[in-house]
Amino acid sequence: MPGTDAVATERLAGRTGRLVGGTGRLVGVSEANVTPDDARLEDAPGAGEADAAPGAGEADAYGLGPEWVPGPDGVPFRRAARVIVLDREDRVLLVRGHDAGETSRSWWFTVGGGLEPGESARAGAVRELREETGLVIDPAELVGPVLSRSAIFDFARVTCRQDEEFFLARAEVTHLDDAGWTALERDVLDEMRWWHLDDLDAAVAAGTVVYPRSLPERLRRLLVGWDGRTPHLEEHDV
């Protein structure tokens, strides 16, 4: 994994766009309130290939990946860790992705992903942060977990359930690097962006979808200071 100074992507100053499925290329560029530190996605070898493993099961056949296993109710399930990343200006880092089975559906969410076998949520959080953004943070620097969530949602035409723990972190470096993205991530992730909270509030009011839905409100509380509690959310979007 390259360090944060290894530029595998070109910087995109004042622009955002969307990802053409399977190509890894950011296109349809339009003006937006994005700083030069935001990353531009570009072509990557193997983009669009499935992350399948032999015998991974039905969930993997739909492109979900072998870490998804059937839960007691038969619904594909995994445990995950996420990071609410803030920079020095209190901007929050979010990722926009779309549904592999219904590309018109897109939403913004925090950095993170599924845990590896035997991996702690804290270790998984810093690993996912490094792989998805190039940002390197010591596990001891994570605050929390400040939030937990059990989410039931549709993805790739499959109903899934994911139990998540959220940590809070500060990033001294804001340059983003997508070199660690998997082929599946290149298929379904569209952009990364540092959001001012006022801009995020305005976007949500205009219909932009953000998960967790209460993230802007909860983040404002966390900026005052974490009270040591870990509230739990149940969110259903099926």
Image (spheres, rainbow, N blue to C red):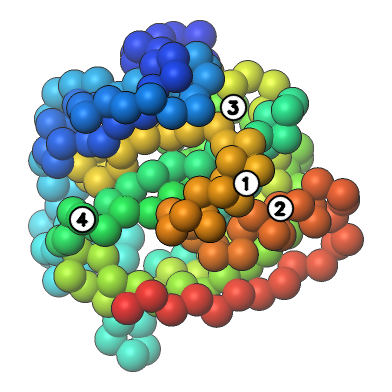
Identify the amino acid type marked 1.
Ile
- Residue wearing tag 4: 104
Mark-to-mark CA distance, 2 and 3 = 21 Å
Pointer 2 local density, CA inside 10 Å: few below 14, some 14–19, many at least 20: some
Query: Which of label 3 and label 4 is nearer to you?
Result: 4
Quick one: quadrant of the N terminus? Answer: top left
Crowd band around label 3 with a 10 angstrom C-alpha radius: few (<14), some (14–19), many (20+): some
Q: Residue at x 24, y 21 (%)?
A: 42
- Decide which of 57, 28 is in the foreground and name it: 28
Q: Secondary structure at mark 1?
A: strand
In the displayed structure, does residue 29 sit left or right of residue 133? left
Q: Vertically, is 75 above or below 179?
A: below
Q: Tell which of 129 and 38 is nearer to you.
A: 38
Which tag is nearer the camera, tag 1 or tag 4? 4
* Near-viewer residue (189 or 179): 189
The residue at the far bottom in this view is 73
Mark 1 vs 3, N-terminal side: 1
| Three-letter amino acid code at the position of disc 4 | Ser
Which residue has dot 2 on it? 219
Q: Residue at x 60, y 75 (%)?
A: 233
Provide residue 156's location: percent of width, then percent of height: 19, 63
| Badge 1 vs badge 2, beta-carbon distance below 8 Å | yes
Decide which of tag 2 and tag 3 comes sooner along the chain: 3
Disc 3 marks which residue? 136
Q: Position of residue 85 (x, y in %)?
A: 63, 39
- The type of residue carrying mark 3 is Val
